Image (tube, grey):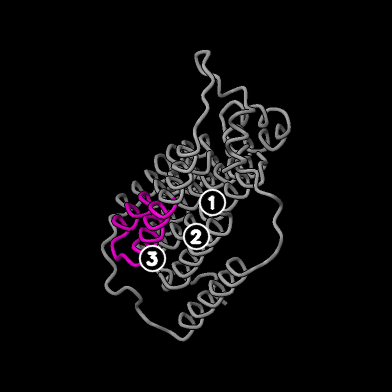
Amino acid sequence: MDLQSYLLLSATLFIIGVVGVIARRNAIIVFMSIELMLNSVNLSLVAFSAFLGDVTGQMIVFFAMTVAAAEAAVGLAIIIALFRNKQTINLEDINILKW
Amino acid sequence: MHQRDMWFKNEPRCVIHGRLIRPSTTSSRLSVILETLLFYFFGTISVGSALMMVTRRSPVIAALYLILNFFALGGLYLSLHAQFIAFIQILVYAGAIMVLFLFVIMLLNLGDEKKLAEKISYKKIIGAGLSFGVLMELIYVLGFSTASLPPSQFEKATEIGTVENIGMQLFTTFLFPFEVTSILLLSAIVGAVILAKKKLR
């Protein structure tokens, strides 16, 4: 397989994640779509790392994973706090920051 | 294939138990075929499970499809010779992070959404159309580009993805980002605890 195939797969997964963020209104599913987008970028980084023979891509993936873990913890805590205050995680109903 | 055979002949690490393992051309060709097969297998699973994840009504089923997607990506990492990243993917993503997601979904006791998209507004249609356009653009740029990439170093990939090499890089070149990561995780823990608290005082 060549590099282009992996990049195409990565782009497809990323756009599926973008459509999930745009079209869904459930906050947890939007959050999971963001994780999907992070993972698709990780895939292209690992593919570049393997095809260019450079370890830097895999190191960036390692740090991206730790950032994703921290982001998941804080994001889920925000979702729990929202649910406690509003009894919903439907993003249409959460509009206190809407202008 | 020629490059790969040359690499196997010149590589001293291929000596296992005192015997030089010299793969024949057929086994090298087999590995290329196997890699292609694995790419299509895991690529189909990952795209299919991502589509299922985005379109399911129940968040629990969506989370389970996302776990399947992470396993497929782990398989792709393994076929790209990134062993350490593949195992971290399974352990951290499919293990820890998705357990956290499932825990929160079941804690909140969410029902299924009534309809997938409650109101199909023009904004969503424009957004989906634009992202589809971006996908087409990316396919055009990546698939039909004649940009010259540097020569493929795929033969070296088995060495750079090992735990030994990653750990060496982590504690020499990337020592400062590694330390910053610990501060980031600490602040994430504190932030999660404070946000999830019942009452702030």
Asked where in the image residue B52 lies, by quadrant, the reply is bottom left
Q: Residues within 10 Å of mark 1 (few under 14, many from 20)?
A: many
Q: Is residue A17 shown in magenta?
A: no
- Range of the magenta residues? B39-68
Same subunit under labels 2 and 1?
Answer: yes
| Dot 3 or dot 2, earlier in sequence | 2
User: What amino acid type is highlighted by mark number 3?
Assistant: Asn
Comparing labels 3 and 1, the label whose residue is closer to the camera: 1
Residue B184 location, quadrant: top right
Looking at the image, do the residues carrying marks 2 and 1 touch, with CB atoms under 8 Å apart?
Answer: yes
Task: Return the residue found at the far bottom.
Answer: B122
The residue positioned farthest toward the front in the image shown: B25
At label 1, which amino acid type do we have? Answer: Leu
Q: Is residue A90 left or right of residue B189?
A: left
Between residues B31 and B61, which one lies in front from this camera angle?
Answer: B31
- Which residue is the site of mark 2? A9
Q: Position of residue A44 (x, y in %)?
A: 57, 53
* Quarter of the rendering occupied by the C terminus of chain A: bottom right
* Residue A26 image offset from top left, x and y in percent: 38, 65
Residue in front for this viewpoint, A36 or B112: A36
SS at circle 1: helix
Tell me if mark 2 has few (under 14), some (14-19) or many (20+) residues whose alpha carbon lies within 10 angstroms of its own: many
Q: Amino acid at mark 2?
A: Leu
| Viewer-side residue, A96 vs B4 | B4
Q: Residue shown at 45%/51% (left/top)?
A: B36
Disc 3 target residue: A26
Give the CA distance from mark 2 to mark 1: 9 Å
Q: Main secondary structure of the magenta part?
A: helix
Residue with the mark numbered 1 = A43
